[in-house]
Structure formats: C-alpha cells, structure tokens
Image (cartoon, rainbow, N blue to C red):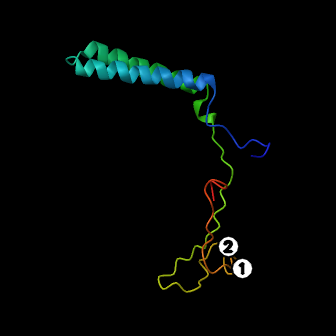
Amino acid sequence: MSGESHGSHAGRPASWVAVTIIFIGFVVGGVALCLGPTWIMFWVGAGIIVAGFVVSWMVHLFSDVVVDAPRVLPEIVDYSVFGTRTAKRRGGPEGESLESPVATDPQTSPHG
C-alpha cells in the first residue's frame, strides 16, 4: 500500500451519531408497530427520525465522501457481437493492444 490516502470508509464520529439517532428512531417505530400498533410510540419514533435528519443536516453528513483509488481493469473490453475489433474498445482505436485478457492474482492486485 502506498503512503498516500485515498479516503476512508469510517466516517466522522458526528456522522455516526446522526446515523445512530435515525436508526434508534426506526427501531422505536418498528417495535411500536409490532406491539399493537402503539401509535403514540410510533410517532415518537418518527419524531426521533426527524431529529436524526436535523442532526445529520447540522453535521453535514453527506460531506463524508468515500474516495477510492482508481481501479485499473487490465482485460480487453470489446462490445462487438462477433468479436471483431471495433472503435468501442476501451481507450478507442489507440487503446489496448492485447488480444486476450490478462489474468491477475486477486491476492496481489485485489482491484485488478
């Protein structure tokens, strides 16, 4: 792995708090529907969900962007029905020149 960062799947703690609040609201509302339904408890759950959405807006939940490293696909992509060489190959006419796909070991190159 290189030293440069390509993003994180973890998210910020404030974002996790917002998601947890929304999840708790769904659990409360779901339990309320299973118990009767108990409408007061259901609407309390709905209120918790709305509060979670407000918190997510305040902490900018959607600014937690996951940026992955670009994936390099070494195989040839040719969309011709008959297998002939067309301009639709990846990279255009000057694109890849290999005639067969390249097999890679997923243990050494997991994204390739």
In percent of width and height, residue 90 lies at 63, 72
In percent of width and height, residue 71 lies at 65, 56
In depth, the one of 105 and 85 nearer the eye is 105
In percent of width and height, residue 51 lies at 47, 19
Q: Dividing the picture into quarters, in which one does residue 38 lie? A: top left
Q: CA distance from mark 1 to mark 2?
A: 6 Å
The residue located at (61%, 67%) in the rendering is 103
Q: Which mark is residue 94?
A: 1
The residue located at (65%, 67%) in the rendering is 74
In depth, the one of 17 and 43 nearer the eye is 17
In depth, the one of 69 and 62 nearer the eye is 69
Judged left or right of residue 5, residue 15 is left
Judged left or right of residue 108, residue 16 is left
**Residue pointed to by mark 2:** 91
> Is 40 rendered above or below residue 75?
above
Quadrant, the C terminus: bottom right
Q: How many marks?
A: 2
> Is 46 rendered above or below residue 73?
above
In percent of width and height, residue 32 lies at 28, 18
The amino acid type, in three-letter code, at marker 1 is: Glu
Q: Dividing the picture into quarters, in which one does residue 9 lie? A: top right
Q: Are marks 1 and 2 in contact (CB under 8 Å)?
A: yes
Judged left or right of residue 104, residue 32 is left
Secondary structure at numbered mark 1:
loop
Q: Dividing the picture into quarters, in which one does residue 12 lie? A: top right
**Residues packed near mark 1 inside 10 Å, few (<14), some (14 to 19) or many (20 plus):** few
The residue located at (59%, 83%) in the rendering is 86
The amino acid type, in three-letter code, at marker 2 is: Gly
Q: Which mark is residue 80?
A: none
Secondary structure at numbered mark 2:
loop
Residue that sits furthest to the left in the current view? 36
Residue that sits furthest to the top in the current view? 40
